[in-house]
Amino acid sequence: MTAYYNEKVERMSAEEKKALQSERLVKVVKRVYDNVPTYRAKMDAIGLKPEDIKSIDDITKLPFTTKSDLRNNYPFGMFASPLKDIVRLHASSGTTGKLTVAGCTQHDLDDWAEAVARGFVSCGVSRESIIHVAYGYGLFTGGLGAHDGGTLLGATVVPASAGNTNRQLTLIKDFGADTICCTPSYAVYLADEFKKAGIPTSELKLKRGFFGAEPWSEEMRVKIEEGLGLKAYDIYGLSEISGPGVACECEYQAGPHVQDDFFYPEIIDPETLEPVEKGARGELVFTTLDKEGMPLIRYRTRDLCAIIYEPCKCGRTSVRLAKITGRSDDMLIIRGVNVFPSQIESVLIKDKRVSPHYHITIDRINNLDTMEIEVELDRSIAFDEVQEIETLQKKLSAEIASAIGVSAKIKLVSCGTVPRSEGKAVFVTDKRKI
Ligand code: DLL
C-alpha cells in the first residue's frame, strides 16, 4: 500500500492543482514585484504588471531569472523578506567565486521539510526509520534538507555529514540505519569500503537510499543497489530553489516526482528560450510558488531534462522528471560540489608565473572523483629546480582547494603544451563514465 505524507495535495486532481498553482503564482509575483527591485525592473522593462498574471497559464509572460541575477544582487538583494524574517542562509558556488546565496524564512523551511518528507514517505520511510545523513551540512543544502525532512516525520536522524568514511561505516552498522542519504558516487564508494572491511550487506539494515546532488545513471543505480543491498531512489534539488526534495522518486523508481504545488517546472529551449513541446527535452526552469524569503520566478537551472506527464502507478498526480542528461552551461559537479572552470581560472590568473592556458581532466578513480589541472608556465619563467616547480604546484593546488572546496592535482607544463582550440575553448575532459 502506497503511503502518503500529504495525500490531499499529493493526489490532487489536475483542476485543483491548477487552481492552487494559479493562486500561488499570482501571490508570489506580487510579492517579488513589491519587494525585489530586480524583479520590478525586469517586469517594468517589458510593461508587465502583477495584475497581468491571473493564472499559471500566464507564467510564460514572466521574465526569466538566472544565476547572474543572484550574483549581481549578492548577497541579499534578491530577498523578498526583511532579514529579520530570514532564519537560515544557504549557499552554493557561483560562477566567478561569488557564492549563490539563498535565504529561508521559517515558512520556507517548513515547506522544504514537507517536500523532503513527502519523498521519503513515498519510498517507505516512517517514524520508525533511522536515517543516516551523509550529505555535507555547512552551507550545502543536502545535509540539513534531508535532516529536516526526516525530523518532520519523527524518524531518528543521524547527522553524520560528509567525510571520514571509517566512521560512516561504523555508524551505519552500529546504529542500524535503514535509510541513507548521500551522493550516488559516495554510495558506490561506501559499498566498496564495506566490502574491503569484510562487512557483508546482510550485516546492515539498509533498505533504501536517497541519492542526488549530481547526475547518475541506471547502471550506477544497479551498482549501488547491489553494493549496499538497498533500493536506490533519485532525489533532485538545487539550493536556489530550496535544496534536496524539489523532486524525489517514489517506490516505483520512475523518475523524481516534482513537488509541483511548491515548485512549478517548465522546460525551455536554452537557445530560443521558448517552451518546448510537451514532454520534449530542454532546460529545466523552476518558479517557487510558495516561498517568502527568496522566491524565484522562472529560474533557469541549466539542467537538461524533460518533464514526464504520464500518471505514475503510485497514484500521485505530480509531474515527474526524466534523468538529467547534462547542463546548458559549463558547471561541473565534482564529488557533489558545483565547480565552474571560471573559478579555477580566477585563481590561476592571480599568479604571474603561470599563463591562463589550462586544461582540466576529471576522472573517477576507485569510485572517487579526481581532478587534474594542467597549467602552462608563463613564457618568461624558466624553472630548472624540481623543488621550485613542486612548491608552485602545491601553492596553486592549495589555493584552488580553498576557492572551490575540492582538491585538484596541479601539473605545470611548459608554455605551448596545452592544446589551443579554434572555436570555443575546451577546458575540460570528463572521463567519468556516469
Ligand atoms: O545539489 C541539492 C541537493 C542535495 C540535491 C542533495 C539532491 C541531494 P546545489 O549544490 O545547488 O544543490 O546543486 C544543484 O546539482 O542544478 C543539478 O545540476 C545537480 N543535481 C542535484 N540533484 C541531482 C540529481 C544540490 N538527482 C545542482 N540528478 C542541480 C542530477 C542533480 N543532478
Image (cartoon, grey):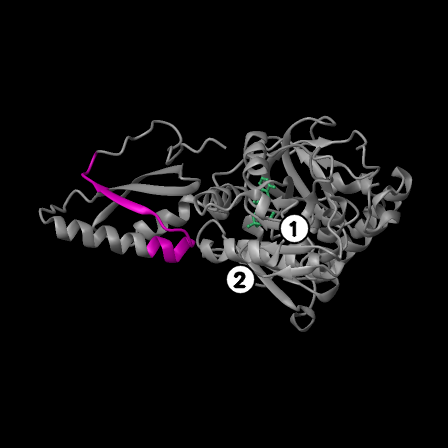
Q: Position of residue 127 (x, y in %)?
A: 75, 57
The residue under label 2 is: 138
Is the shortest distance between ligand 1 and the CB of mark 1 under 8 Å?
no
Secondary structure of residue under mark 1:
loop
Task: Please give the label number shown on residue 178.
Answer: 1
Quarter occupied by residue 229: top right
Q: Can you tell me which quadrant of the image ligand 1 is in?
A: top right
Residue at screen point 65% across, 38% down: 284
Residue located farthest toward the left when viewing the structure as drawn = 384
Q: Position of residue 336 (x, y in %)?
A: 50, 47
In this view, the residue in front, 272 or 401, is: 401
In this view, the residue in front, 409 or 375, is: 409
Secondary structure of residue under mark 2:
loop
Residue at screen point 26% across, 34% down: 418
Inspect the magenta stretch and tell me whether residue 414 lies in it. Answer: yes
Magenta span: 399-416
- Residue 203 left/right relative to 32: left
